[in-house]
Image: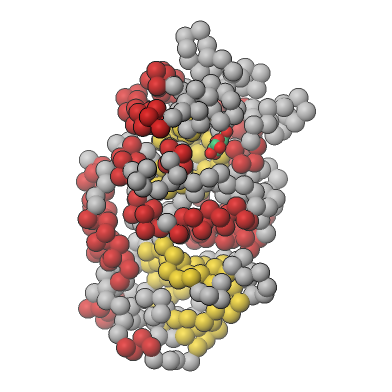
Amino acid sequence: MLFNHYQDNRSAIAVKIPRMGFAVAFCVLALAAPILTLDNGLMRTPPMGWLAWERYRCDIDCQNDPKNCISEGLFRDMADRLSEDGWRELGYSYINIDDCWSDMNRDGNGRLQADAKRFPSGIPHLARYIHNRGLKLGIYGDMGTHTCGGYPGTTLDKITTDAQTFADWEIDMLKLDGCYSNVTEQEQGYPAMSKALNATGRPIAYSCSWPAYQGGLPPQVNYTLLGEICNLWRNYGDIQDSWSSVLNIADWFFKNQDILQPAAGPGRWNDPDMLVIGDFGLSMDQSRSQMALWAIMAAPLFMSNDLRTISSEARTILQNKVAITINQDPMGVQGRRLLVESSGIEVFWRPLSDKTSALVFFSRRTDMPYRYQTSLGKLHYATGTYQIYDVFAQREMPALKDSTSFLVSINPTGVVMWYISAPADEDQDNAHAGGKLRGPAFHRSANHILL
Ligand code: GLA
C-alpha cells in the first residue's frame, strides 16, 4: 500500500517538472532504486516540532532551575506555546522528550519509568495534555545498556517491552539513540525496534540514530534498509548552539549529497539535527541560513529553544510560511548544492511540486554583502519567464527570464532564498523543452538587473 503511494509519488516527479534537467536526472536515479518505506504511513513530509536536547540537555536540577529542568512542566509549557502562539497551525506538532527523563531503574515488571519527582503526573498524563492541544508526544530511548546520559537503555531483550510501554503511554514518536551498544547489537536492535513498534498497532514514528554511530556513509550505512525501517535518521554528529556547528553539519550533508539525497523521500528523511534558531549562537542572517538550508535538505524541523522567551525576529524566521512550504513540499525530493564559487558563494536548489522550485544563494564570506551575478539559465533553468518570490524579504520580485543576468546581494554568512514558479501560460510554449539544458543562447549576455 505504502509502496504504491511511493511509486506514484516518484512517477509524478517526472511528469511535474519535465523542463528541468537536474530534476529529470533525479527521477531516473530515484526510479532505478525504489526503496520501501517503514510501513506506518507517517511523516510523508518532514516532521516538525520541538525537541528538548540542544537547549535543555540533561538539566535535572529542578530545585534551582525549575523553569528549565527536564520535567513535565517544561514540556507542558512548550505544548502551551506551540498551541497558543501559532506554531501548531504551521505544522510544528511534535513535542519531544530527549534523554534524562527516566528513573535510574526499571520498575518491578522491568518496564522503563519516568523520574517520579520530575514527572509526578506520569508520561501518560503528559501525553493526554499534549494530545488535548492537538500535538504529539515523542520520547527518547537508547539501543544499548545505557542512554548517552547514563539512564537505563534498551538492550535486545527489552525491545518488545519498551515498544509496548511507549504504545501504552500513547507516545507518537521514538528517537532511539545508540550509545553503549556494539555494531552487532545495533544491527539487530534497530530493525527489531521497528518491527516491535509496528506490532503494537499504534502508529509511532521512528527516529534512528544508527547511521550516526556507523560514520554516516556506506558501506557501513545501508540507506536502503534505513528507508525500510525508520522514518528519519540522524546521519551525523550533534548540533551545538554555534554557527561553526551549523556550518560543519551543512557542509557534511552537501559534501555527501550524492549518497544522502536519494535516500530521502516521503516517510524517510535524513536528519541533520535540531534548529538552534532562537538560542544564543546564531545571528539573524545565520538563522535565516539554517532555516533555508534545512528547507532545501527536506530536513525535519525540530526547534530546540525557549518558546516562552523567543525573540520576535527568531520567531519570524521559524514561522516563515514560504520557507515551511518549501520544507514541507509533498513531492519530498531532497535538494542539492549546485555550485561552489571561488568567491565563497554557494547555490542550492530543490525541485518542488507543481513546477515550482527553490533556490538558495549562500555566502560563506565574512567581509561585506556580496553582489553575486548569475542567471537562471546558468543555474540550469530551461527557457522561460519565471515568477520569483524572495522568501525572507517576503516580497514578489519582477518576473525573470532565464537569460536575464541578475545581481543578488548576499550578507556575510547569510542567504537569499527564492521560491520560483513559471507562469501558467508559459508552460505550453516550453513543453517541448523536455528537461534539456539550454543551448548556446544560454551564453548570450544580457543586461543584468539588480534584484
Ligand atoms: C546523543 C544524541 C543527542 C542527544 C544525546 C542525549 O548525543 O546524538 O541528540 O539525544 O545523546 O544524551
User: Which x, y percent locates residue 67?
Assistant: 72, 33
Q: Quadrant of the N terminus?
A: top left
**Total label count?**
0
Q: Can residue 317 be spotted in the picture?
A: no
Q: Can residue 184 be spotted in the picture?
A: yes
Q: Is residue 345 left or right of residue 13?
A: right
Q: Residue at x 41, y 80 (%)?
A: 378
Q: Which of the four quarters of the rendered structure image does ligand 1 lie in?
A: top right
Residue found farthest to the top: 108
Q: Residue at x 40, y 85 (%)?
A: 403
**How is the structure coloured here?**
secondary structure
Q: Residue at x 59, y 67 (%)?
A: 364
Q: Reply above or below: 442 against 169.
A: below
User: Which x, y percent locates residue 122?
Assistant: 57, 20
User: Which x, y percent locates residue 111?
Assistant: 48, 15
Q: Reply above or below: 364 against 294.
A: below
Residue found farthest to the right: 64
Q: Is residue 49 left or right of residue 269?
A: right
Q: Residue at x 23, y 44 (%)?
A: 3
Q: Quadrant of the C terminus?
A: bottom right
Q: Quadrant of residue 63?
A: top right
User: Which x, y percent locates residue 163?
Assistant: 41, 23
Q: Reply above or below: 318 against 24.
A: above
Q: Reply above or below: 109 against 10.
A: above
Q: Quadrant of residue 59?
A: top right
Tell which of 377 and 352 is nearer to you.
377
Q: Is residue 385 left or right of residue 368?
A: left
Tell which of 94 and 292 is nearer to you.
292
